[in-house]
Image (tube, helix red, strand yellow):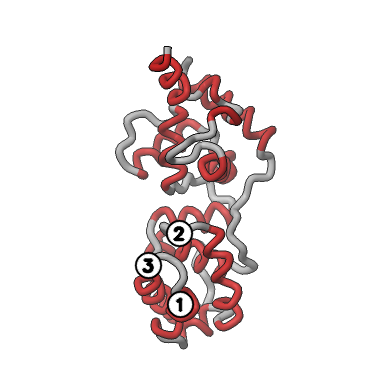
């Protein structure tokens, strides 16, 4: 099977199975999404969604959060992973947004990545979700699933995976393809025990077919 055939099969399957795939983070504004994505690093969306209602009630926008100390923010997010670092990031990035961008989350990817605690993946997620930017954010789920299926080959880093996926998927599908792979990894292609018996793409999955060959 060629790479193009594999991509076409995956696209056809997910277009039917997940036609409206989207972020599972709860947010109502660009600032809330940015904060939620920063908090989601090495943390589940479920835990973030349990944490953000009280945080957003206390600090509904960048101006409000910019007036808070990292210690004050910490009290709202202490139940998630790495709360000390994330509290410092949120205190700093909210001040940067107010001082440099008039209180509005910048739309330029480079401006986003200039904010404290915002890396390439976070900036790409915000861009894809908010503005439909044709990028492929690569988190642990996307990195794992892409390699298992065979959409990426010998990609040693998230950036290498990103580059290969951006070549394989049509540009206009990148924002939703990102969610296809995340959700597939979150609920079917699990890290330790992938649910191959309930997976709809085993026919083209490199991992599944290699495992079957080993069994045989």
Q: Which mark is residue 81?
A: none
Label pair 3/2, CB-CB below 8 angstroms: yes
Question: Mark 2 packing: few (<14 Cα in 10 Å), some, or many (20+)?
Answer: some
Identify the residue under disc 1. Answer: 94
Question: Mark 3 packing: few (<14 Cα in 10 Å), some, or many (20+)?
Answer: some
Res 211 → quadrant: top left
Residue found at x 47% / y 36%: 193
Label pair 2/1, CB-CB below 8 angstroms: no
Q: How far apart are the alpha carbons under marks 3 and 2?
A: 9 Å
Report the label total: 3
Whole-percent x, y for residue 23 in the image: 59, 53
Q: Which mark is residue 43?
A: 2
Label pair 1/3, CB-CB below 8 angstroms: no
Whole-percent x, y for residue 14 in the image: 62, 34
Res 78 → quadrant: bottom left
Give SS at disc 2: loop
Identify the residue under disc 3. Answer: 82
Give SS at disc 3: loop
Residue found at x 54% / y 70%: 51
For the residue pair 103 and 48, the one nearer the viewer reads as: 48
Give SS at disc 1: helix
Q: How far apart are the alpha carbons under marks 2 and 1?
A: 21 Å
Earlier residue among tags 2 and 1:
2
Whole-percent x, y for residue 76 in the image: 49, 78
Question: Mark 1 packing: few (<14 Cα in 10 Å), some, or many (20+)?
Answer: many
Residue found at x 57% / y 67%: 50
Q: How far apart are the alpha carbons under marks 1 and 3?
A: 18 Å
Q: Determine the residue located farthest toward the bottom in the rendered image.
A: 67
């Amino acid at each position: 099977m060629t790479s193009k055939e594999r991509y076409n099969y995956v696209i056809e399957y997910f277009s039917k199975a997940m036609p409206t795939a989207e972020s599972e983070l709860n947010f109502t504004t660009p600032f809330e999404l940015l904060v939620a994505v920063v908090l989601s690093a090495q943390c589940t969306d479920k835990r973030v969604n349990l944490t953000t209602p009280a945080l957003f009630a206390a600090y509904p926008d960048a101006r409000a959060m910019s007036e808070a100390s990292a210690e004050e923010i910490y009290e709202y997010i202490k139940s998630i992973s790495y709360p000390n670092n994330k509290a410092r990031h949120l205190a700093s990035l909210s001040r940067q947004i107010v001082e440099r961008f008039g209180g509005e989350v910048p739309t330029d990817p480079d401006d986003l990545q200039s904010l404290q605690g915002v890396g390439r993946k976070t900036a790409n997620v915000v861009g894809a979700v908010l503005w439909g930017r044709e990028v492929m954010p690569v988190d642990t789920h996307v990195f794992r699933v892409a390699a298992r299926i065979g959409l990426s080959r010998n990609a040693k880093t998230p950036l290498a995976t990103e580059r290969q996926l951006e070549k394989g998927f049509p540009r206009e599908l990148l924002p939703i393809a990102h969610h296809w792979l995340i959700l597939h990894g979150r609920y079917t292609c699990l890290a330790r025990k992938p649910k191959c018996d309930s997976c709809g793409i085993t026919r083209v999955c490199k991992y599944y077919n290699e495992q079957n060959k080993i069994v045989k």
